[in-house]
Image (tube, helix red, strand yellow):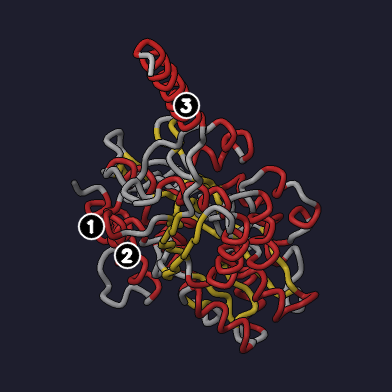
């Protein structure tokens, strides 16, 4: 064989081989990676009363993303009012997604439990400004608005009270006493007790440090003193028609017929309407007599929020689930099943929501409410004081002394 021809054939084979390898390599570089099918496990904390609603939302979420991942969601009931403490006890073992009251936001953000929400403009545009404010710290959004109804107002049975009757707490107690029935309010909770102090010129709130409180509820200056409010509370408690009972007992009294009016929130709207039917009434809080004048009862207001744990092992999926739970459709379903007022603008503007007696009452009360912004030292001292008032001051301790002690506890560092 000719040696020159052999070298030519070998060179040609080498070129063809290199060309084939080059095409194969280019093909591999241009190929997209095969999509991965994840297994995602998420833990969700929410109110015990929301379990059925959440399970429905979980199912629709899993169905929506069935082609992308196997999503397993574990639900644990957790009080929204105590969620902060449970989360901060062990962030790494805490829920991926959790519901909480907005007054806990600053502490959760400061502790690193929540990260600022990326691309927050869509959330801001979709929700009521007050809800966005409640979900923000220093203008930065840290959580997803869920409801805009975390306040309280008056439920009453129209079979016993007229619209004029429910303008005055004393008048309501007189009507209930005549009928041997009860008007209830929870004085074991400082959240409700704020109603007596909020519109008197006496103040409470957070200091600039965001942790400690200022409080003038023991003041002996101005048109209304702290002792005037205390005497008014004692007068209310002295009525045989007044019942100091927690929220769950309010509903029990509605069921057994003993309670014909009470102060509560929208979370009881569905249950109350089922019991009282067409006689269900809802209104702003009444006024009460204090130092010879009528004072409109005040209220704390706020929102429920959904947070995504900054330590979640699946942050993308946890974020998607938080967005799903707080979407317009989900908030509409929440109103239909739980009677809770949406923070989503489109959901809140629906005719169904606008026709709700509870929502209308909450809106009427909003003129006399303020966002709940108090530090942790507020709750127990007020509870101790109000328990004494509810019991009629059995120890006979001077009212100013009790008020001073309460304020000392509220403002403690």
Please count the marks in the image.
3
Q: Is residue 238 left or right of residue 380?
A: right
Picture layout, residue 402 above or below residue 368: below
Between residue 384 and residue 48, name the one nearer to us. 48
Q: Is residue 401 left or right of residue 322?
A: left
- For residue 215, say whether it is visible: no
Say which mark, if any, is on residue 20: 3
Mark 2 or 3: the one toward you: 3
Say which mark, if any, is on residue 405: 1
Q: Quadrant of residue 21?
A: top left
**Place of residue 63 in the rendered image (x, y in percent of width and height, measured from the top left):** 62, 61
Label 2: which residue?
385
**Place of residue 319 in the rendered image (x, y in percent of width and height, measured from the top left):** 47, 47
Distance in Å between CA atoms under marks 1 and 3: 89 Å
Compare marks 1 and 3 and give the one earlier in the sequence: 3
Compare marks 1 and 2 and give the one earlier in the sequence: 2
**Place of residue 300 in the rendered image (x, y in percent of width and height, measured from the top left):** 49, 52
Compare marks 2 and 3 and give the one earlier in the sequence: 3
Considering the numbered disc 2 on the image, is that residue within a helix, a strand or a loop? Answer: helix
**Place of residue 384 in the rendered image (x, y in percent of width and height, measured from the top left):** 30, 67
- For residue 232, say whether it is visible: yes
Between residue 341 and residue 301, name the one nearer to us. 341
Q: Quadrant of residue 39?
A: bottom left
Residue positioned 42% across, 56% down in the render: 228
Picture layout, residue 26 above or below residue 316: above
Q: Is residue 411 left or right of residue 286?
A: left
Residue positioned 78% across, 57% down in the render: 352
Residue positioned 58% across, 52% down in the render: 324
Residue at the extreme left:
413
Say which mark, if any, is on residue 376: none
- Quarter of the rendering occupied by the N terminus: top left
Distance in Å between CA atoms under marks 1 and 2: 9 Å
């Amino acid at each position: 064989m000719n040696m020159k021809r052999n070298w030519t054939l070998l060179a040609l084979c080498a070129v063809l081989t290199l060309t084939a390898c080059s095409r194969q390599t280019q093909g591999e570089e241009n190929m997209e990676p095969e999509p991965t099918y994840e297994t995602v496990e998420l833990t969700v904390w929410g109110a015990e009363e929301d379990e059925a609603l959440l399970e429905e939302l979980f199912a629709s979420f899993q169905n929506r993303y069935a082609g992308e991942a196997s999503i397993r969601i574990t639900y644990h009931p957790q009080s929204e009012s105590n969620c902060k403490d449970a989360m901060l006890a062990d962030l790494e073992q805490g829920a991926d997604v959790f519901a909480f009251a907005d007054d806990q936001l600053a502490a959760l953000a400061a502790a690193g439990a929540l990260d600022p929400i990326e691309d927050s403009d869509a959330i801001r545009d979709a929700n009521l400004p007050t809800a966005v404010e409640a979900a923000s710290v220093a203008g930065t959004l840290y959580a997803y608005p869920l409801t805009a109804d975390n306040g309280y107002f008056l439920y009453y049975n129209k079979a016993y009270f007229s619209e004029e009757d429910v303008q005055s707490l004393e008048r309501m107690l007189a009507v209930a006493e005549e009928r041997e029935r009860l008007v209830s309010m929870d004085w074991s909770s400082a959240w409700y007790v704020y109603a007596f102090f909020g519109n008197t010129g006496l103040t409470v709130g957070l200091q600039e440090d965001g942790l400690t409180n200022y409080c003038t509820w023991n003041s002996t200056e101005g048109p209304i003193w702290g002792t005037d409010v205390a005497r008014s509370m004692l007068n209310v408690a002295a009525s045989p028609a007044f019942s100091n009972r927690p929220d769950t007992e309010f509903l029990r009294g509605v069921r057994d017929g003993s309670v014909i009016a009470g102060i509560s929130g929208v979370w009881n709207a569905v249950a109350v309407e089922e019991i009282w039917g067409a006689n269900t009434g809802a209104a702003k809080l009444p006024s009460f007599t204090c130092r010879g004048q009528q004072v409109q009862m005040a209220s704390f207001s706020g929102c429920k929020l959904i947070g995504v744990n900054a330590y979640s092992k699946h942050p993308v999926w946890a974020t998607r689930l938080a967005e799903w739970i707080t979407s317009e459709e989900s908030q509409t379903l929440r109103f239909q099943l739980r009677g809770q007022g949406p923070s989503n603008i489109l959901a809140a503007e629906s005719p169904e929501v606008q026709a709700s007696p509870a929502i209308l009452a909450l809106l009427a009360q909003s003129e006399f409410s303020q966002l709940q912004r108090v530090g942790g030292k507020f709750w127990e001292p007020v509870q101790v004081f109000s328990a004494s008032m509810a019991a009629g001051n059995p120890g006979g301790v001077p009212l100013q002394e009790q008020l001073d002690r309460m304020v000392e506890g509220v403002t403690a560092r």
